[in-house]
Image (cartoon, helix red, strand yellow):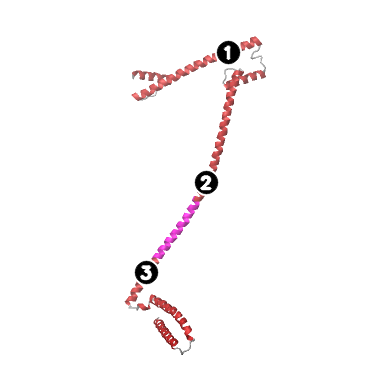
Amino acid sequence: MCEKITKVNSWLSTVFGDQPVPHFEVNTRTVDILYQLAQSSEARCSDTALLIEDLKQKASEYQAEGAHLQDVLLQGVGLSCGSLSKPAADYLSSLVDTAMVLGVRDTSLGSFMPAVNNLTNELLEAEKSNRRLERELRALRKRLGATLVLRSNLQEDINKTVKSQAVESAKAEERLLNMDFVTAKAKELSNRRERAEAQLLSRNMDKSITHQAIVQLSEEVSALKQEIIPLNKKLEPYMDLSPSPSLAQVKIEEAKRELAAIDSQLEMNMDFK
């Protein structure tokens, strides 16, 4: 535990430098966390130092190779950077910039071609991905348009449904009001009928002169009139017969008696009505 605390304090002092180390609660958990951070930081610093050393070594190698190539150009060809024309210097600068962009080790054709091929392949893959994304975008736009149209139709249907519900609600409320009015009116009429019936009963009214009794008598009179019609038709053939045949006379007398009885009943009913 003491070793961890010592290492943590040393690491914090290195991190903050001249600034004071912030106060923190010293316990097992915080010390373990800071100890792991210190180890990770030291590992990264070590890796960074190795990378810096590698880059320094490569830089020195590049500088040595550049000095060697400069000596070759100066001694073998008699060229120097100052003796180059402006277009040649521009071309050389462009060549160097291109090599740096492509990330090649040197400016030879053998280094440029693979780098250019890699960039071409990356460009083709990017174009292929771009075309795929464009197809997906068109499909998404199409689905979005269909979705917007569907949303508009649904909103229109919802508005129509809301209006229809409002109308139906108003109609239902009106029907309820009418129903309440009809119920109250029916109750009032029922009470009036009961009071009228009680009043009629108190006056000992004959039920035979009520509306229902009169309607029943009218129906009976109509039925009797209908019964008379076929009897009159039976008498028609006998009206032209000679009074001499006794059988015809008997039939006529029977028909007359039946007709007289029906007429008498009819007159009684009519008088009663």
What numbered label is drawn on residue 271? none
Quadrant of image for the N terminus: top left
- Under mark 3, the amino acid is Ser
Q: Are marks 2 and 3 in contact (CB under 8 Å)?
A: no
Dot 2 or dot 3: first in sequence order is 2
- Disc nearest the viewer among 3 and 1: 3
Confirm or deny contact between disc 2 and disc 1 (CB under 8 A).
no
Instruction: Judge left or right: residue 188 versus residue 131.
Output: left
**Residue 262 location (% of width, % of height):** 41, 82
**Foreground of the two, 210 or 39:** 210
- Neighbours of disc 1 within 10 Å: few (<14), some (14-19), many (20+): few
* Lateral position of residue 226 relative to residue 204, left or right: right
Label 3, label 1: how far apart the Cα atoms are? 124 Å
In which image quadrant can residue 75 be found? top right
Q: Which mark is residue 190?
A: 3
Q: Residue 242, image x and y in percent?
A: 48, 89
Q: Which mark is residue 150?
A: 2
Q: Nearer the viewer, residue 12 or 222?
A: 222
Q: Judging from the image, what secondary structure is the residue with disc 2 in?
A: helix
Farthest residue, direction bottom:
244
Total numbered labels placed on residues in the image: 3
Which tag, 2 or 1, sits closer to the chain's start? 1
Q: Which mark is residue 65?
A: 1
Callouts 3 and 1 close, C-beta under 8 Å? no
- At label 1, which amino acid type do we have? Glu
Q: Is residue 177 magenta?
A: yes
